[in-house]
Amino acid sequence: MSEEQNDSRRISSHPILEEPFRATIEFSWNGEPLSARHGETIAAALFANGIHIFGYHPKDQSPQGIFCANGQCSQCMVIAEGLPVKACMASVEPGMKVSSVVGLPELPPADNKPEFCDIEEIEVECLIIGGGPAGLSAAAELGRIGVQVLLVDDKDRLGGKLVLQTHKFFGSIDDCYAGTRGTDIGTLLEEEVEGYESVNCWRSCNAVAVFSDRRVGLVRAGGNYVLVKPETILIATGAREKSITFRGNTLPGVYGAGAFQTLVNRDLIRPAKKLFIVGGGNVGLIAGYHALQADIEVVGLVEALSECGGYKVHVDKLVRFGVPIYPRHTVVSANGSEHVESVTIAEIDSNWEIVPGTERSFACDTLLVAVGLDPVDEFYHKATAFGMRAFSAGDAAEIAEASAAMFSGKIQGLTIARELGREVPEIPDEWAEVEEVLKSRPGQAGNEKLPQLKNGTVPVFHCTQEIPCNPCTSVCPVGLISVGGDMRGRPRFTGSDHGDRCTGCSQCVAICPGLAITLVDPRKNAEHPIVTLAHEFQKGQINAGDVVTVLDTKGESLGQLEVFKVSASKKLNRTLLVRLKAPAAIAARIAGIQVQERSVTEPMEKYVSRVTDDTIVCRCERVSAGTIRDLIRMGVRDINEIKAITRAGMGACGAKTCHSLTKFLYRQEGICGEDVTNNVDRPLFVEVPLGAFCCRQGEK
């Protein structure tokens, strides 16, 4: 693989992110010399070199590739220096010999008998598992009070999913950094926590088990095993992605939104050329936007419901950038032999059945699955079962937005401090109120209300749905934007009520997380006013004098206009302000600029039917949906019995994906959840090398 080919898959220029300097190192893959960047994971290095197949399953020789990129599954298993490791979690080292898994991995020879060592044990007032927005916010509250805290996270950087979020956050500026990008919020929270002497952060540290003696097992970076006895424990472990079953669902190229965002926004790797999305929640919608920013074509998005469940401003962004949304559709199959080559979708009826004759196929190399999240709450349930003073926050307690997770963490931080007997002020009632607002579902979308263009400049609000967001009200220097008494109110311009005028500063345009505010200025030319809109794509791709296609919120073309001016400055926080001269008749309707050609989204001439029924429920053991359905129809009502017969759930991931899919199959067969015996959790929630239990780092 030439350096030029390698670099073509790396994102060297991004509208939001800057590529840090990382030294080039050499490693080998199946004996072939390759280059990588210092500190990146094996998976990122392989993707950068165009390698998507990491091995073949020993049961049926099916190709294996990345799926979650979060250490939750084991589909990306490779052999590194003779040991099986997860490619998404293990860092590539200079000279490292990495190979694919073909068949069952061979254990290295037992040259040395290990020397057993005493296990290090520590006590701490509060153990926080998870360094995302909830865990960091709780640690900050506890650190401010002086509580002794140990915060552990399995990544080398704190912030959780904030690290992957390049978009500006919703909510309010005062409460949760609204208008600030998620990556920047993660840095702010991390820096705050590190400023407290009583808070100790262990990065690249896996919490693996909670034991009946109220101790928690941790495996630190390098393999040190430590037992922690906390007085209190906070579970802020976030969520794991749900999955769905369809033919070809384990092909390399089918993976979750989190994996995609990890490769693109953390590793700065372009893992796809043409992407199709399943799921219209905020996660899938935002991932589509991130793909466009990384110069990846987004072919389309299917949503099983009649409308997307995510914020409408996210839907509108994709639509006006040229991405079609297909409601009441589902994925039928991912097609290809060793990698995704196309996807077939179809309409579904009121009974969620595919409507024959509506199948269409689209050429793509990646299928991104974003169909919801499940709390990672097994640590919390085990801790409470063993009588520990346990608390949960963020997605581990309830799936919601990261802004709500911050408040959840703050509240639990003070709650824990009081549980420890510290004298702390009463938790403000408004904290719980704000948390509930931030967790609230989006309201019904209304009709767009376009203003009458008179003499002065006027902001146009293209957000027609009640969502918790009001940074535009905070930045208006003359206070002429209001959402009423509730953060979820739709913004409106109040200048006409009092005769006041908009100054035309464009701050509301630049800060809007949904890119849903434009500014129309008719002062110089009422027939052709200047329209200012926010644009978050690569600087230099659009310049004064360019002719662009402008679209409304529904993605309908309003014609072509010449760009009048493009502004960029540090104050705009990496957002470009694009100004165009538009006819007055369409000026207020302009919501965005088309960034993707319509030809990208055209279906193939003939739909592709995947003949092989390889709908897999258990990825680790390659157990099909048909096999499990047969057992359900035979009367099996205990998932543990299914495991004993088929090995479904016995793989390395510990049933993190297949358990929920098996329960879904029961529901499809009309069997209520209370009639089904759930799978018994394993004592260890994360795989641990046996050597970690007997030796400390550096000892043999």
Image: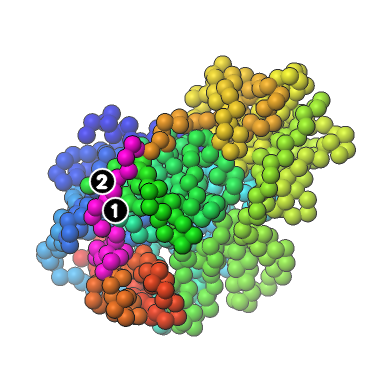
Query: In which quadrant is the N terminus drawn?
Result: top left
Q: Which image quadrant for residue 355?
A: bottom left
Q: Which image quadrant for residue 424?
A: bottom right
Q: Nearer the viewer, residue 579 or 409?
A: 579
Coordinates of residue 445 in the picture (x, y in percent): 65, 49
Q: Residue at x 81, y 27 (%)?
A: 454
Q: Which image quadrant for residue 409?
A: bottom right
Looking at this view, name the residue that lies furthest to the front: 357
Magenta-drawn segment:
604-627
Residue at the spot of label 1: 248
Does the rendering let one see residue 618? no
Q: Residue at x 40, y 56 (%)?
A: 354
Label 2 to label 1: alpha-carbon separation:
8 Å
Disc 2 secondary structure class: loop
Give amino acid for label 2: Gly
> Of callouts 2 and 1, which one flags the residue occurring earlier in the amino acid sequence?
1
Residue at the spot of label 2: 336
Q: Does residue 564 appear to the left or right of 55 in the view shown?
A: right
Confirm whether the magenta stretch covers residue 171: no
Dominant secondary structure, magenta: loop
Q: Does residue 548 appear to the left or right of 273 in the view shown?
A: right
Whether residue 545 is situated above or below residue 182 in the rendered picture = above
Coordinates of residue 437 in the picture (x, y in percent): 67, 59
Coordinates of residue 22 in the picture (x, y in percent): 36, 38
The colouring scheme, among rainbow, by chain, secondary structure or one colour, is rainbow
Q: Residue at x 53, y 78 (%)?
A: 389
